[in-house]
Every structure is written in C-alpha cells, then in structure tokens.
Image (cartoon, grey):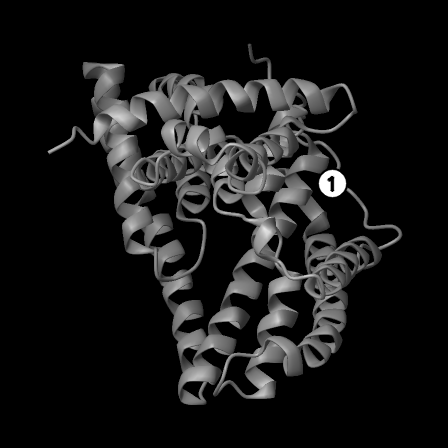
Amino acid sequence: MPDPLLPVLLAVPVVVLACQAGGRAVRLLGQPPVTGEILAGIMLGPSLLGWLAPGVQHHILPPSALPITCALGNLGLLAFLLRIGLELDLRSLGSTRGAVAAVSLSGVLLPMALGAALGSALYPHFAPDGVDRLPFTMFVAVALSLTAFPVLTRILADHGLENTPLGTLALACAATDDALAWCLLTAAVALSISGTALSALATLALTAAFAVGLIFLRPQLRALLKRAGRTSDDLVLVLLFAGLCHSAYTTDQVGVHPAFLLGTTTPRGLSAVERSADRLRAVVLPLLLPLFFVDTGLHTDFSTLRAGQWGWGAAILAVAVIGKWGGRPAQPGSPAPTGAGRQRSARS
C-alpha cells in the first residue's frame, strides 16, 4: 500500500512556494497577497496546469493529496481566525454600534435584491430538477449577499488594519453579515427540502447559545489559562488549540466561524495567551493559511464551462460586484479610537 504521506510531502511545498510567488507578483499591482494565492490555485489546478500538462499536474498534486492539503488549510484558517478574534477589541466601537447595524444591513439588502432578480433569470437554465423557483432564487440571492469573511480578515491582516478602528468596524460588520446570511442560506436549503425554515431558527438559536455559553465560561477559562501559564507556554498553546478544534467541531453544522467567536471571548491580558497566539500565527500565516485559499483554485475547472455559460458567469460577477460596492453607505461613519487607540500591530 503506497504511503499517503509521500504525495503530501511533494504537494505542500509546491503550493506554498507558488503562493509566495503569486502573492509577491500581485503586490506589484497593488493587490493583496491573498489574490495571488487564489490565482496560484487556479494556475496549479485543472484550469491551467491540468490543461497544459495533465501528467505533471497529476504528479505534483495527485487527487489523494488534495483532501489532506485542504484539511491542513482549514486548520490554518481556524488558527488564523482565532488570532484575529483575540486581537479584535469590540469595545473600541463605542457609540458606533448603530453604524455596524447600518453598514451590515446595507451590505446585505442590495446584493440580495439584485441576486433575487438574477436568480429568477437563472432558474430556467440552471435549476436542478425538482427544485422550485422560490428556493432556487432565494439561494442565489443569499449566496450573492455573503461576505467572504476569511478573505476579508486576510486582506485586513496583510495591510496591518485588523486592529485599527476601521478594521474593527469592517470585521464587526462582516461577522454580522456572515451570521445573518448563513441563517438565510440555511432557510433556503430547508425550504427546498421540506418547505419550512425552522432549521434557520435553530441555527440562530444554537449560535446565540454557543456565544452565551462562551461568555459565561470566560471566568473559568481565564483561571484555567492563568494556571497553565504558570506551568509553560506549551500547555497554554495546547489548551487554546484543543478549545479551537472542539469549538469548530461543535459549531460545524451551525454555519458560523467558531474560531473568530472563540477568539473574541478568550480572556485578554494574559501574556502566555498572547505569546501562544503569536506562535500560532508564526506557523499558520506563511505555511498553512495559503493552503486554504489555494484550495478553491485547485478544484475549479474553467474548461468545463460551455460557451453559453461564460455570459452568465460574467453576469453573476457583475451583480456580485455592483451589489457589494453599491450597497455600502456613502458616509458609514467610523469608530473613534478608545483607550490605547491600538493602530497597526507591531509584527514581524
């Protein structure tokens, strides 16, 4: 039986190096490195390398390696979102919580309205057999209203903006959008299956229960981490990672970003926690996180699109851009710095 580790040992360095090259290339064009990582995935996947040299692509990125690289990338994403949540200080929003609600709603309503119109037009051409117009249209509308939360957090982190008032506002709005849109998406799926949206209410209730539970457990978690910090930073790191994995497992079917939520409720002011989070970031950001963003491109095959589908693809892209760009308020407001007024993180 072939060793399953061998293809991973070849695939991971190829992907990581390609992501570094792609990130540096797009920086020259003024774009965030995450864009280059996604493009690297497309070029290494069936759309380009698999089309030009399928034998080479199959050798360096065999199908057996992709589930493992995908799992590593998702672990990297969880650790990254935990770090972002630890750094995010929602108290800095101050009196601008109303702006969060306004920006969140405007970022959802217009894309959803445009998506509903597009979904109605797409229905005769792309709806699967047995799916009614309403759930299909609702699915397209909600899908176009979603915020790519991992991509947003990565862009903010790459620019050192995640701890600024603007970054805090953007993350709070994106988290609100994400929770709302995923509940609506659950309702759309439930409607297509059973004709009821009760599962969406269950999603909302479970999310709220999970958040409340983390808040109530915060004193106990603080005491546990404080005692562990007296022993060693390694123990604190293990406890954080174990809590991260268990919270992700628990909320996998809920549809929220558990690592971000866990990070925001993890006790602050503990030096051992800060050091452990920095150790996570030192490994995750350059090595594991790119595997998450490149995975989409590795599973995308543009060659399967028929000639008539390119126009619909362009229409979907245009509606997505117009909806998100046009949905932002003209004067959204921004929170004023409070306390120490944390600005850019001093990171290496």
Q: Residue at x 72, y 21 (%)?
A: 27
Residue 67 position, x and y percent, is: 32, 42
In the rendered view, tell whether residue 111 sits above or below residue 227.
below
Closer-to-camera residue (271/299): 299
In the rendered view, tell whether residue 120 sits above or below residue 64.
below
Q: Residue at x 47, y 71 (%)?
A: 186
Q: Could you say which quadrant of the image residue 241 lies in?
A: top left
Q: Amino acid at mark 1?
A: Pro
User: Which corner quadrant holds the N terminus?
Assistant: top left
Q: Could you say which quadrant of the image residue 218 lies in?
A: top left
Residue 6 position, x and y percent, is: 24, 24
Q: Is residue 290 left or right of residue 236?
A: right
Q: Residue at x 60, y 86 (%)?
A: 134
Q: Is residue 114 left or right of residue 44?
A: right
Residue 77 position, x and y percent, is: 44, 37
Q: Residues within 10 Å of mark 1 (few under 14, many from 20)?
A: many
Question: Can you identify the residue that label 1 sits on?
Answer: 335
Residue 197 appears in view: no
User: Which corner quadrant holds the C terminus?
Assistant: top right
Q: Residue furthest left?
A: 1
Residue 44 position, x and y percent, is: 52, 32
